[in-house]
Amino acid sequence: MKLSPDAITSLLTSLFPSGMIDDLAREREVVVRERKLDVRVLVWTMVVGFAVGGEARSIAAYRRTYNGATGQNLVASSFYDRFTAQLEQLLRDLLDHAVEEVAVPHTIAPAFDRFRDVVVADATVVRLIRFLSAFPATHPGVSGLKLYLVHSVTTQSVIARAITDERTHESTLFKTGSWLRGRLFLLDLGFFKYRRFALIDENDGFFVSRLKRSSNPLIVRELREWRGRAIPLDGTRVFDVVGDLCREHIDVEVEVRFQRRAYNERKSWDSKRFRVVGVRDSDADDGYRLYITNLPSGEFSPEQVATLYRARWVVELLFRELKSQYGLGRFRTEKEHIVRIQVTAALLTLVVSRAILRLFVDHAQELGDDCVFPTERWAKTFRSYAQQVLSEIVVSFSYEPNLPDTWYREARQPSPSRLTLLEEVNAALYAGFMS
């Protein structure tokens, strides 16, 4: 049985029910009184229209998309006035709702079932075209927005996010607490901090991070015996000896010291024992890829730890998808709240795309089809047909757009007194002839 177009429309309109959009819009004062603009269509224009690409980063293009979908003729000033901080809050509310509803069933290694969730935290910098004082960059005279995401590998969904300026370090956005329990965190060097690792461990969470060279922890015990005349590692520091080793793997227990958070204006020192594993790689510094973790040695070999860490690349692919497929960063504005609106719209676009992907994954499983849908290939497909998705949604709201009328209104010269180039040439020639 094939999926019908109605199945996709039904899925998306149930993800953001019209009543919910209307209620939130009134609560956030996006809609103060009934007007010609339909806030439901505005939301879907922002979400689906963002995927169309190119010029769709300008408010003028959003207005044309809205008018084309509904058959209405909203003037530019009326449409532009809707792009407020209240609209940003509405989109954020919808995003909070959506991330709870959308989760693609994972088909990855059974080892991931050991954890409540496998999570990647990372950030990317979006260079803004114009200077915005709200988003100072690390270099003077330019603007830089930092998008921080906490991404679930197992469900392929965003579970937390923040928008800051480029100067804010992403590690300060990582929150600790009881939510860490049972989750495995795959962290890059930007989040490397012994105190953070200790808090994850003390909240019954797990972590894997690349080992920072400047840390050089003390080895207190080898977790694997080697035959022959193996170099003893107890009492040495990792980077002091790693260059002399020839073994395929390194698996040791290390002791690290770190400062706890200040209490009564005093900082105390503490120590913790973690595990450092290494996998031989001729392209890596010192010949090994080194990781620090609290995963138990009896359950996860060094190779398995390294393989788990490879899943961290999903967030890199996610950022690449947002930038290359959905044009994140091609914003034409000098207003902070409009930048935030468009970043939130991009994340909503991602959520909607994943919702449809989940529909196809479920459908393939029902048919017994073992096909897979690579995320970037899926994003290209979704982007190519996003305009049709918007049209189906708007038709379900009982609009009957008239494309020729829309083209006629949008393409004609808005000011009758303004001449085209050929009309200017003609007028100049005629004036010269008459003189």
Image (cartoon, helix red, strand yellow):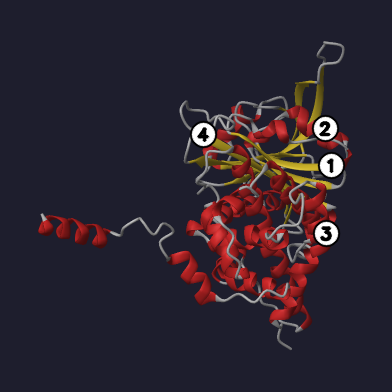
Element at badge 2? Answer: helix
Q: Look at discs 2 and 3 and give the one toward the viewer.
A: 3
Mark earlier in primary sequence (2, 3): 3
User: Tag 4, which secondary structure?
Assistant: strand
Q: Residues within 10 Å of mark 2 (few under 14, many from 20)?
A: some
Q: CA distance from mark 1 to mark 4?
A: 33 Å
Q: What type is the residue that disc 2 sits on?
A: Leu
Q: Earlier in the sequence, mark 2 or mark 4?
A: 4
Circle nearer the viewer, 3 or 1: 3
Quote the CA–CA distance across marks 3 and 1: 31 Å
- The tag on residue 391 is none
- Please provide percent x and percent y for residue 418: 35, 55
Q: Position of residue 113 (x, y in %)?
A: 83, 58
317 left or right, relative to 89: left
Judge by depth and name the residue closer to the eye, 349 or 13. 13
Q: Which residue is mark 1?
A: 180
Mark 3, secondary structure of its residue: helix
Element assignment for label 1: helix
Q: Horizontal and vertical percent for residue 87?
A: 70, 48
Residue 143, numbered circle: 4
Query: Could you tell which of marks 3 and 1 lies nearer the N-terminus?
Result: 3
Task: Give yes or no for contact between labels 2 and 1 (Cβ–Cβ under 8 Å).
Answer: yes
> What residue sits right under mark 3 in the picture?
20
Amino acid bearing label 1: Leu
Q: Which residue is mark 2?
A: 199
Query: Does residue 94 sit above or below 215 in this rendering?
Result: below
